Image (spheres, helix red, strand yellow):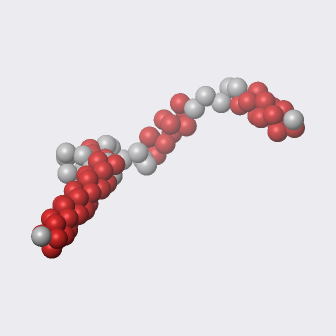
């Protein structure tokens, strides 16, 4: 009778371990960023390393308050 209880306990432990492994794979799958498009979500974006796109990014930068921000950072570091 005790041998039968041990077999049942072993089966429960095996089932719990299998469920934990499946849960770990599910969490890894969900956090890895794989989407339903087969992992090709970034491929639909146009390349952004062309000269025109780099120039557009540089022209879009707002550097008007850069001196003020740098002086504020210097004041904070001096404290």
Left or right, residue 50 beside residue 64: left
Residue at 24%, 46% in the rendered image: 35
Relative to 59, residue 43 above or below: below
Quadrant of the image containing the C terminus: top right
Q: How many discs appear?
A: 0
Furthest-front residue in this view: 1
Left or right, residue 78 beside residue 33: right
Q: Position of residue 50 (x, y in %)?
A: 42, 47
Nearer to the camera, 43 or 48: 43
Nearer to the camera, 7 or 22: 7
Q: Position of residue 11 (x, y in %)?
A: 16, 65
Relative to 46, residue 73 above or below: above
Q: Position of residue 54 (x, y in %)?
A: 49, 42
Dividing the picture into quadrants, the one containing residue 17 is bottom left
Q: Is residue 1 visible?
A: yes
Residue at 81%, 34% in the rendered image: 76
Q: Is residue 43 visible?
A: no
Nearer to the camera, 57 or 28: 28
Q: Position of residue 21 (x, y in %)?
A: 26, 60
Quadrant of the image containing the N terminus: bottom left
Residue at 15%, 73% in the rendered image: 3
Furthest-right residue in this view: 78
Left or right, residue 67 beside residue 78: left
Residue at 43%, 49% in the rendered image: 49
């Amino acid at each position: 009778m005790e041998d039968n209880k041990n077999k049942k306990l072993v089966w429960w432990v095996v089932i719990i371990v299998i469920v934990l492994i499946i849960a770990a794979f599910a969490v890894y799958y969900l956090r890895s960023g794989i989407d339903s498009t087969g992992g090709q979500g970034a491929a639909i974006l146009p390349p952004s390393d062309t000269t025109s796109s780099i120039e557009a990014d540089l022209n879009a930068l707002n550097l008007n308050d850069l001196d003020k921000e740098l002086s504020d950072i210097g004041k904070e570091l001096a404290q």
